[in-house]
Image (cartoon, grey):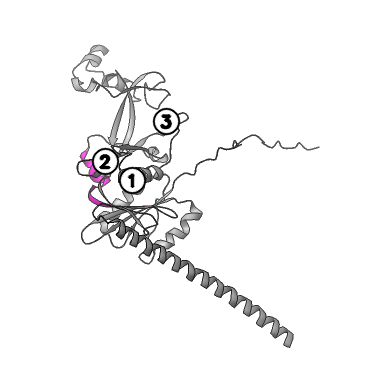
């Protein structure tokens, strides 16, 4: 008699009242002719949003926005990042699917990833750091200002949320910083690689821990190598305020639980300087909830809201009438077939 296979009954059991929050996924694309430089910026932004983005999304000239909206639902896409160019500005729209809102920015300045890498002294080229989502850091976003609150809510919904009680520090390899300058109302975007370095270890000791054996032929004793002039004084110094006590083990020599380590940030790029333009209630359309440059009176806002509602009512009436026409034509076709069979 053959053995029966045991079936798991207790794995992946979701407790009642606890629904797993869906992971945000994004499409980063350009609309219209943007040029080679902005095309590279689109690819750099896709790199920032990895792994929850379509890295090889193909956008053709004949594609319209509704083409991507129609496929976004089955693919679980929750946000669009759309770059476009006008005669005077380069624009970035962040859209929440399927019903909005949409936040529009002017890109007043940017630097590509290759430009940032060429300007920094140290680079982080590990591909494994892009296998997990970056940590989102918001600085100076006020909860009292309406526009600042809307921007913060949109940016927070764009990246996966973290549970500080259960998160694994080894999975946090990158961070995306959005810094809001209250003086000129500009937003600075920076993208960093996060690295933990054991505190109090000189560069010479770190060299001994490497796989390659150091050349000690010109030294009489190993102490000459450890205490000699091959290491500058500034290399062993630690900056105050950067030390943390690790609650978990991390990759890297000396990064053990309950030990002191220094947190280092290595810029990856790109850099963006954004200026808020407007916030719309719908998906790239609808009522304007906030406009940075145009201030409307209550009467003007009420008139605009009424026009939007009338437009939506007219659209729903046309859709309902079209559905009724389709149903009527199907019924007439079926009756015609029945009459034809009865005549035969």
Contact between marks 2 and 1 (CB within 8 A): the answer is: yes
Reply yes or no: does residue 152 show up in magenta.
no
Contact between marks 1 and 3 (CB within 8 A): the answer is: no
Please give the label number shown on residue 180. Answer: 2
1 or 3: tag closer to the N-terminus: 1
Give the camera-side residue of 58 and 242.
Answer: 242
Examine the rendered structure and indicate whether residue 162 appears above or below residue 227.
below
Instruction: Report how far apart the C-alphas of labels 1 and 3 lie in the structure.
Output: 29 Å
At label 1, counting other C-alpha atoms closer than 10 Å, the crowd grade (few under 14, some 14-19, many 20 or more) is: some
**Residue at 78% over, 38% down:** 2
Examine the rendered structure and indicate whether residue 237 appears above or below residue 168.
above
Rendered location of residue 31, percent (x, y): 33, 60
Please give the label number shown on residue 244. Answer: none
Examine the rendered structure and indicate whether residue 196 appears above or below residue 89.
above
Q: Quadrant of residue 168?
A: top left
Q: Quadrant of residue 12?
A: top right
Q: Which residue is mark 3?
A: 170
Rendered location of residue 200, percent (x, y): 29, 17
Asked which secondary structure carries label 2, the reply is strand
**Residue at 70% over, 84% down:** 339
Please give the label number shown on residue 151. Answer: 1
Instruction: Report how far apart the C-alphas of labels 3 and 2 lie in the structure.
Output: 28 Å
**Residue at 37% over, 18% down:** 259
Identify the magenta region: 102-119
Would you say residue 344 is visible in this rendering? no
In the image, taking residue 105 as reference, residue 315 lies left or right, namely right
Rendered location of residue 185, percent (x, y): 23, 44
At label 2, counting other C-alpha atoms closer than 10 Å, the crowd grade (few under 14, some 14-19, many 20 or more) is: many
């Amino acid at each position: 008699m053959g053995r029966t296979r045991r079936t798991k009954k207790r794995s992946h059991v979701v407790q009642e009242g606890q629904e797993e929050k869906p992971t945000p996924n994004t499409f980063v694309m350009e609309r219209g002719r943007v040029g080679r430089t902005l095309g590279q910026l689109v690819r750099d932004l896709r790199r920032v949003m990895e792994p929850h983005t379509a890295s090889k999304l193909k956008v053709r000239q004949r594609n319209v926005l509704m083409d991507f909206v129609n496929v976004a639902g089955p693919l679980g896409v929750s946000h669009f990042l759309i770059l476009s160019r006008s005669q005077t500005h380069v624009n970035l729209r962040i859209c929440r699917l399927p019903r909005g809102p949409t936040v529009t920015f002017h890109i007043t300045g940017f630097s590509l990833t290759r430009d940032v890498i060429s300007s920094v002294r140290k680079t982080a080229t590990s591909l494994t750091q892009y296998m997990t989502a970056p940590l989102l850091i918001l600085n100076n976003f006020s909860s009292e200002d309406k526009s600042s609150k809307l921007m913060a809510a949109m940016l927070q919904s764009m990246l996966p949320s973290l549970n500080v009680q259960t998160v694994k520090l080894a999975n946090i390899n990158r961070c995306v910083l959005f810094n809001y300058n209250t003086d000129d109302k500009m937003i600075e975007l920076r993208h960093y690689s996060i690295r933990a370095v054991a505190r109090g270890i000189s560069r010479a000791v770190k060299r001994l821990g490497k796989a390659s054996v150091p050349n000690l032929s010109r030294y009489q004793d190993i102490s000459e190598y450890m205490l000699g002039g091959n290491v500058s004084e500034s290399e062993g110094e630690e900056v105050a305020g950067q030390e943390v006590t690790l609650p978990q083990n991390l990759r890297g020599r000396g990064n053990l639980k309950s030990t002191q380590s220094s947190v280092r940030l290595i810029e990856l790029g790109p850099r963006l300087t954004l200026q808020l333009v407007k916030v719309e209630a719908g998906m790239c359309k609808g009522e304007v909830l906030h406009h940075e440059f145009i201030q409307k009176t209550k009467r003007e806002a009420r008139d605009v809201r009424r026009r939007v509602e009338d437009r939506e009512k007219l659209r729903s009436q046309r859709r309902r009438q079209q559905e009724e026409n389709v149903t009527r034509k199907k019924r007439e076709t079926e009756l015609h077939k029945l009459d034809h069979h009865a005549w035969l």
